[in-house]
Image (cartoon, rainbow, N blue to C red):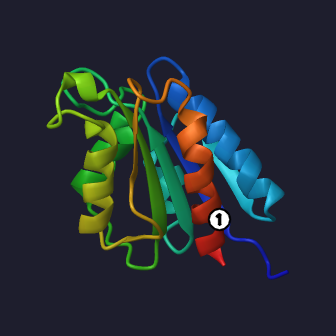
Amino acid sequence: MAAGKKIGVFVGTVYGGAEEVAEAAVEKLVASGHDAQLYPEPQFDDFIRYWEDVVLVVTSTTGEGEIPDNLMPLYLALNEQFPLMPELNYGVIALGDLSYGEERFCGGGRQVDELLQQLQAKPLIPILRVDACVNFDALEVAMPWLDEFVSRLG
């Protein structure tokens, strides 16, 4: 088996649901032979270490479709410093609630996905949007997506 990838898993959470998914993702990535590190309090300096590797962002959405408070400093730093990262591969798992409306649904994850694309990072797989109204247990939807994410790591 080829050497595993270096993967940073960055979490944006309010009530812990996104962190639970992120922890399961780290377990799956490590079990698949990758070097995965969880960042529950994501910082710019941590994120930038992965600019030639892989990041997975797992985030819930808060308020009116916004990024959770613990992820906001990283998002703002990336937006302000705007480091182009064409070598970075990434994935985003966005948790949301469609009952708040399509325009707000998974807004936290969608904003992160859009910013990473502007920074020239490459999605390994399209964003996963999980609707809490349909999928009470986000892991039921996230695990098959993670299987595909892992397969695309090579």
Q: Position of residue 131 (x, y in %)?
A: 38, 33
Examine the rendered structure and indicate whether residue 32 appears above or below residue 64: below
Q: Residue furthest right?
A: 1
Query: Callout 1: 10 Å neighbours few (<14), some, many (20+)?
Result: some
Q: Report the side of 123 relative to 100 (left or right).
A: right
Q: How far across and how far down the image is residue 59, in percent?
A: 43, 37
Give the percent coordinates (x, y) of residue 32: 79, 62
Image point (45%, 79%), residue name: 87
Residue 77 falls left or right of residue 91: left
Q: Nearer the viewer, residue 138 or 112?
A: 138
Quadrant showing the N terminus: bottom right
Q: Looking at the image, which is closer to me, 100 or 10?
A: 100
At x 54% / y 51%, what residue is drawn?
46
Q: Can I make out residue 152 in this image?
A: yes
Image: 137 above or below 11: above
Residue 132's place in the image compared with 21, above or below, is above
**Which residue extends farthest bottom?**
2
Q: Is residue 140 left or right of residue 87?
A: right
Is residue 22 or residue 115 the one in the foreground?
22
**Residue 40 visible in the displayed image:** no
Amino acid carrying mark 1 in the image:
Val
Residue 35 location, quadrant: bottom right
Residue 126 x, y percent position in the rendering: 39, 62
Q: What kind of element bears circle 1?
A: helix
> Mark 1 — residue?
150
Number of disc labels: 1
Q: Residue, x 34% and y 44% (percent of image)?
A: 109
Residue at screen point 74% across, 51% down? 28
